[in-house]
Amino acid sequence: MPKRVFSLFILIFFVVPLLAEEPGAVAVDKKVGYALLDAIAQTFHEMAMTGTGEVEKVTQAIQKFMADARKAKEQNQIDAVFFGRYRRVLAIIKLAIAPDPSGILGHMINKELSSFVYEVLGEDWKGSGPGAIGQVAKAIADEIINLHLYLDDLEAKSKLWKIYEEKYAPPERK
């Protein structure tokens, strides 16, 4: 199990660039979202560099990330979409490293990891074979980048909604 956890950290470290945002005129909610994403990247970077990645340390980090995300959600600093996807990334990390010596959770873990890999990468998960943990790490890194892009594009999305509402609104609303 420690080798699996360490492999996950190494792969995330190499696939996920640190997502530090340049200071500037970014809305407060974006800054909070970027900080939440950076916390994951920074933590795994440190664990990969130091070789520390015990299940307990990862669990503590995930609990802190979740507490920070809940607080940001309660203060309306992140929206429900970001919160849900961020929470799912944390859950996938937890599932990927969760010890299950008796195999009770194996089917559920495999189902969730498979679903996540397919939804993020568009690939079938390799299961427990060679490259499986790397595939999960790549999907996690890709989803972190997707969340970063989601924050980057909030204004553009809002503008597009307005364009579509004006263009395709029923006649009585125009």
Image (cartoon, helix red, strand yellow):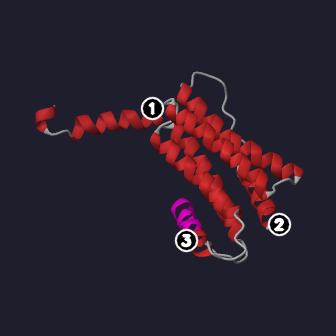
SS for callout 3: helix
Q: Main secondary structure of the magenta part?
A: helix
Q: Amino acid at mark 2?
A: Lys
Q: What mark, if any, has residue 111 been given in the picture?
A: 3
How much space separates mark 1 and mark 2, taking CA atoms? Answer: 42 Å
Image coordinates for residue 30, horizontal then vertical, percent: 55, 31
Which circle marks residue 89 in the picture? none
Give, as a three-letter code, the residue at label 1: Glu
Circles 1 and 3, Cβ within 8 Å, touching? The answer is no
**Contact (CB < 8 A) between labels 1 and 2?**
no
What residue is at 67 percent from the left and 63 percent from the top? Answer: 96
Q: Nearer the viewer, residue 3 or 108?
A: 108
Residue bearing the label numbered 2: 3
Mark 1 or 3, nearer chain start: 3
Residue 91 appears left or right of 153 = right
Against 27, residue 3 (above or below) is: below
The image quadrant where one finds the C terminus is top left
Residue appearing at x 73%, y 55% in the figure: 12
Secondary structure type for disc 2: helix
* Residue position for label 1: 155
Seen at 76% across and 45% down, the residue is: 43
